[in-house]
Amino acid sequence: MSKVAIVYFSGYGHTVKVAESVAAGAAGVAGTEVSLHRIDAEGQLSDADWQSLQAADAIIYGSPTYMGGPAWQFKKFADASSKPWFSQAWKDKLAAGFTNSASTNGDKYATINYFWTLSQQHGQVWVGTGLMPSNAKAHSPADVNWTAGFGGVMTISRSDASVEESPSTGDLKTSALLGERVAKAAIRWA
């Protein structure tokens, strides 16, 4: 049994939908146990959440992109991860990431790069999307990897869109495919 943990913050609920799609994709892989760990409004996780991260074979990071980087709540979690870092407790676990913001670009890749750097400090092995972009004239936000995220999933929720309206079906499918890829990689890695 492979264990995939998804640790994320969501300010308005849109990133929850992305996390749930990642989880659904991972859960669809036989032999995979998935856990979701939402960082609270104060940047905290419970002791049980930390224990689940410790037991995981893969940790997928998620946060909205605010002002060109992850939310401060996620950064507080990252700083608190210095305790497992000190003992190299997450070394050789797989890692991946996803982010959401209102803009098509919005410097989302800076958030993905933040996750990558965090994973490398922990000695983790990064898993990208492995998806080709949907970049022809016929493509739209309903298509997989319309934002052309290779290092991680980058979804869009327009600033005036409700949680029911966004992210798009293409973004959610892309998120599920990342979860599936990480789960399959965790099984092979084990």
Image (spheres, rainbow, N blue to C red):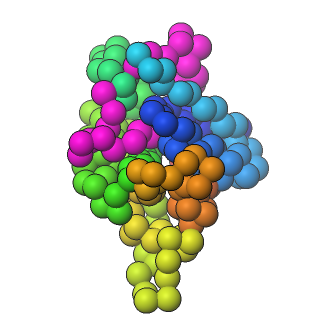
155 lies left or right of 103: right
118 lies left or right of 102: left
Q: Which residues are magenta?
A: 43-72
Q: Residue at x 39, y 69 (%)?
A: 148
Q: For this rendering, which residue is in front, 122 or 100?
A: 100
Residue 181: tell me if it is visible. no
Q: Residue at x 73, y 52 (%)?
A: 28
> Residue 34 occupies which quadrant of the picture?
top right
Q: For this rendering, which residue is in front, 178 or 141?
A: 141
Q: Residue furthest right?
A: 30
Residue 69: tell me if it is visible. yes
What quarter of the picture does the N terminus occupy?
top right
Q: Is residue 137 above or below residue 5?
A: below
Magenta-drawn stretch contains 127: no
Q: Residue at x 43, y 55 (%)?
A: 158
Q: Residue at x 53, y 27 (%)?
A: 38
Residue 178 in the image: state x and y as whole percent. 54, 56
